[in-house]
Amino acid sequence: MTVQYAAAMVLDKYPAFTLPFVMHRLRYSTFVNLPRRFMYFEVPKAGCTTIKSLLRELEGAPPLRLFSPGFRESRRDMFVHARENIPLPSLVELDDATQREVLESPDFLRMVVVRNPYTRLFSAWTNKVMLCEPGYERVYQAIRGSAPAGPGIRFVTFPEFVDHVATEDLETCDPHWSLQTTHTFLSAFDFNLVGKLEQLSDCLARFAQHVGGGGIEFGARANASEGARLGGYDEDVAAKVYSLYRADFDRLGYGENDWPRQPGVESAGREKKLFEDVLERNQLISELYSELERARVAAFELNKVKRFHLLTVANGLLTAGELASSALSRVRRARRAR
């Protein structure tokens, strides 16, 4: 079996990974523009929504296609993460010679944006786990033993989430909290622009200079986590996270003491009710997605039945026609025999 150039580079540095895993990551996470000479490798929870939106502006993309198969989002703008909504090829869609050019040419910009592992993990909890976004019921169920239901819902706390993450393989787990160094295959690829979310405006300024601006406003955009008021780090939790993500801290230039010091704030009763309502909404959205998937499957099966029925009718008509033609021939022969 022939292995593509980019995948071979990755497997040489990460022999424990499988080829399907590497190809899936490269197909989803890389965005290449050959005329403008750049490649972006996305890292979830590290400004990727902002950058993908900018890429869409740069490419003059049409309106977002909503409800893309495989995506369960609770906000319309989050469908920017459906690969089809960014009209740029991935590395694996290019031939080997072009892949090599993208990955090795000195005039090609190879950009990745990373984030402080402390705040990135906290953001994953805030945006995906705490409110149980559609598709993340599995995490809640793994920690609580069942899906959230009814009033008085118990939120998954940040320390509980950290303990759950400690049970996973951080090289291959959910990309929203996997190691950034292995997610991006950092040992295999020569990124010449490794930006930090904490200085995103500087990174985007370099990117804008490389692509010539194109009339796009490249100012940094907010990446807030409102849920931060419901919890926070202490020394024990910070020590656990540092131990789990030590490779990212060492390789990406973040310090052991760079964890947020602001104290957690317990939500007031009304605010807690608001978050309960949001969580309940997300469960409803999740159910609607499930219903949509079931409807798609049912429609597909119905179409198969219809096609089979039409084929049966067509075959029946053809057979009837053949029988009628044969009968007519016999009548004609009988007449001639007289």
Image: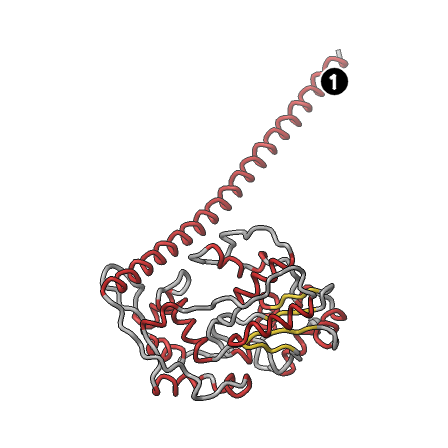
Q: Residue at x 29, y 61 (%)?
A: 276
Front-lying residue, 13 or 196 = 196
Relative to residue 193, is residue 180 drawn left or right?
A: left
Question: Is residue 57 shown above or below 2?
Answer: above
Q: Residue at x 41, y 54 (%)?
A: 290
- From the top left corner, tell me how far across and down residue 257 is, in percent: 43, 88
Q: Locate the C terminus and report the quarter of the image it occupies.
A: top right
Q: Which residue is disc 1 drawn over?
A: 333
Front-lying residue, 109 or 338 = 109
Front-lying residue, 256 or 103 = 256
- From the top left corner, tell me how far across and down residue 108 is, in percent: 72, 73
Question: Is residue 270 shown above or below 203?
Answer: above
Q: How is the image coloured?
A: secondary structure
Q: Residues within 10 Å of mark 1 (few under 14, many from 20)?
A: few
Relative to residue 207, is residue 228 drawn left or right?
A: left
- From the top left corner, tell me how far across and down residue 303 is, in percent: 52, 42
Which residue is farthest top?
Answer: 338
Q: Locate the N terminus and report the quarter of the image it occupies.
A: bottom right
Looking at the rendered structure, the kind of residue marked 1 is: Arg
